Image: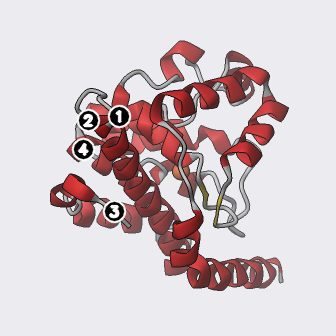
Amino acid sequence: MTRGKSLQYTFVGMDKALALHRKIGLKKFPEKVVEIIWTHCKIVADICMVVADKFEANGGKNVDREMLFSGALVHDIGAYKCFDKRFIPKKNYMRHQYEGWKILKNEGWDERIANMALRHTPLLDFQLKNLSMKFKEEEIKPQNLEEEILAYADIFHSKGRPRFNEFEQYVSFLDSIDKRCSEIAREYREKFGEFDTKIWEANYLVWHRDVNKWIDDFKVSREI
Ligand SMILES: [Fe+2]
């Protein structure tokens, strides 16, 4: 995996971010769930660095890597509140962005990092209404380069059923929600270029296999 000049920033915020995951996650879930959400966040943070490297190499403006990496490490911190006790996403799962924003603000994290959690997936007005989130879609749409890179990177990995996603496959899922959701994703690809998950899949093959088996067993054990 090429990290290039992002290497110097790799460990900024790691301990603090992991401590926050443990603080919030272990109130409700076993250690393994924290491992799953934390690993997803780390994968997305690493993808962000690769996207940032490529963007700058192609003449794009400088990316604030420290903020991007730290924000990516905690972007799903609100997810613990939006999975049920069997680790199945609740109906209002997408509120996790708002829950994450609240947690980060309460914990005194930089407002820019809290905003990255809030805006890491663009949500449309009808979705915000269904989620009882009192925001307008312009407020939730990523508003700076770092927020856009995070939103783009997050497309390529899922955590509820951990796996890498092909862009087109994910975009058809977005299309089924609303055409504008897939259009935004395509705009990001236009801006940041393609991202190939193949090498990443090889690196996480065993982890994905083991963790998905654990999730299946956990759901069964919690149902009894
Ligand atoms: Fe995510």
Q: Position of residue 135 (x, y in %)?
A: 55, 18
> What is the spatial separation of the Cα atoms under label 4 and label 2, in whole angstroms?
6 Å
Residue designated by label 1: 146
> What is the spatial separation of the Cα atoms under label 3 and label 1, in whole angstroms?
19 Å
Locate residue 36: give its quadrant: bottom right
Residue designated by label 4: 65
Badge 2 marks a residue whose secondary structure is loop
Which amino acid, mark 4? Arg
Residues at marks 2 and 1 touching, judged by CB atoms closer than 8 Å: yes
Badge 4 marks a residue whose secondary structure is helix
Identify the residue at image location x=26%, y=63%: 14
Few, some or many C-alpha atoms within 10 Å of disc 1 (few <14, some 14-19, many ≥20)?
Answer: many
First reached walking from the N terminus: tag 2 or tag 1: 2
Residues at marks 3 and 4 touching, judged by CB atoms closer than 8 Å: no
Q: Is residue 135 above or below residue 28?
A: above
Residues at marks 3 and 1 touching, judged by CB atoms closer than 8 Å: no
